[in-house]
Image (cartoon, grey):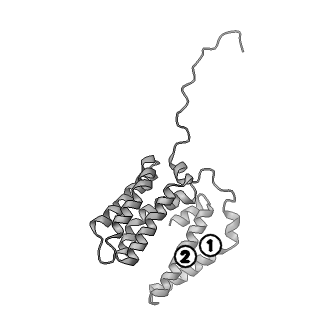
């Protein structure tokens, strides 16, 4: 839905890439799904979507210049990665998530929410809290799950320290200019 709206209204190249990723995920999902009934219809629709997204006719429709105010890849990875901590913890601990792992997931949700609202405290929380919380959460997982949690925590901490992530949340002007004084117009001067 988001990819379709992104292709139709802002005509963004990002929407084409999002559609490609979603269609690739659907094709991969079809490899593990038994093919019958609706699964065959979904696979045919996915094939039509692949043809539609890959065609040259879409290149003329999409905007060629990047948007002037896009946040960039690293800020998007930071906010999506912070939200993705919750399902990642479920994958890392299939037997159930413990309290210390839940703290990391809750921190990821709060950081993503704060960063989405352009609060600098969320960047600082990502810089200072994610790595220690990931280390504590990793102690409650298996070896493979712990490696996954630690890799995610280290990656998000690294992203939080990048300049792009900071600039996406920091205001452009630290202090706003003051009001201009209004001077009454005098007769005879122009």
Residue 67, quarter of the rendered image? bottom right
CB within 8 Å, label 1 to label 2: yes
- Element at label 2: helix
Identity of the residue drawn at 54% across and 66% down? 3
Residue under label 1? 53
Residue 124 seen: yes
Residue under label 2? 23
* Residue sitting at the far top: 188
166 over 21 or under it: above or below: above
On screen, residue 100 versus residue 43, left or right, reads left
Q: Position of residue 112 (x, y in %)?
A: 42, 56
Check disc 1: other Cα within 10 Å, few if <14, some if 14-19, many if 20+: some
How far apart are the two marked residues, 1 and 2, measured between alpha carbons? Answer: 9 Å
Q: Using the image as rendered, state which of residue 1 and residue 149 is in the foreground.
A: 149
Residue 119 seen: no
- Element at label 1: helix
Q: Using the image as rendered, state which of residue 42 and residue 122 is in the foreground.
A: 122
Q: Using the image as rendered, state which of residue 186 and residue 173 is in the foreground.
A: 173
Q: Residue 139: which disc?
A: none
Q: Position of residue 33 (x, y in %)?
A: 45, 86
Identity of the residue drawn at 36% across and 61% down? 133
Identity of the residue drawn at 51% across and 78% down? 26
Q: Position of residue 21 (x, y in %)?
A: 55, 72
151 over 70 or under it: above or below: below
Counting residues from the start of the chain, the first of labels 1 and 2 encountered is: 2
Residue 59, quarter of the rendered image? bottom right
Q: Using the image as rendered, state which of residue 145 and residue 16 is in the foreground.
A: 145
> Quadrant of the image for the C terminus?
top right
Check disc 2: other Cα within 10 Å, few if <14, some if 14-19, many if 20+: many
Q: Position of residue 156 (x, y in %)?
A: 47, 61
* Residue sitting at the far left: 99
């Amino acid at each position: 839905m988001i990819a379709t709206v992104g292709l139709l209204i802002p005509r963004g190249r990002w929407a084409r890439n999002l559609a490609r990723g979603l269609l690739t995920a659907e094709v991969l999902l079809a490899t593990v799904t038994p093919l019958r009934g609706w699964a065959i219809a979904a696979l045919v629709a996915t094939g039509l979507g692949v043809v539609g997204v890959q065609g040259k006719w879409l290149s003329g429709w999409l905007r060629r210049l990047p948007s002037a105010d896009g946040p960039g890849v690293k800020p998007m990875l930071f906010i999506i990665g912070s939200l993705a901590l919750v399902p990642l913890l479920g994958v890392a601990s299939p037997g159930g998530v413990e309290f210390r792992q839940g703290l990391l997931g809750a921190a990821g949700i709060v950081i993503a929410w704060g960063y989405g609202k352009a609060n600098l405290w969320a960047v600082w929380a990502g810089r200072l809290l994610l790595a220690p919380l990931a280390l504590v959460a990793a102690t409650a997982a298996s070896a493979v799950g712990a490696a996954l949690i630690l890799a995610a925590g280290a990656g998000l901490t690294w992203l939080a320290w990048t300049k792009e992530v900071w600039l996406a949340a920091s205001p452009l002007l630290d202090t706003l200019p003051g009001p201009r004084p209004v001077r009454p117009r005098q007769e005879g001067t122009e």
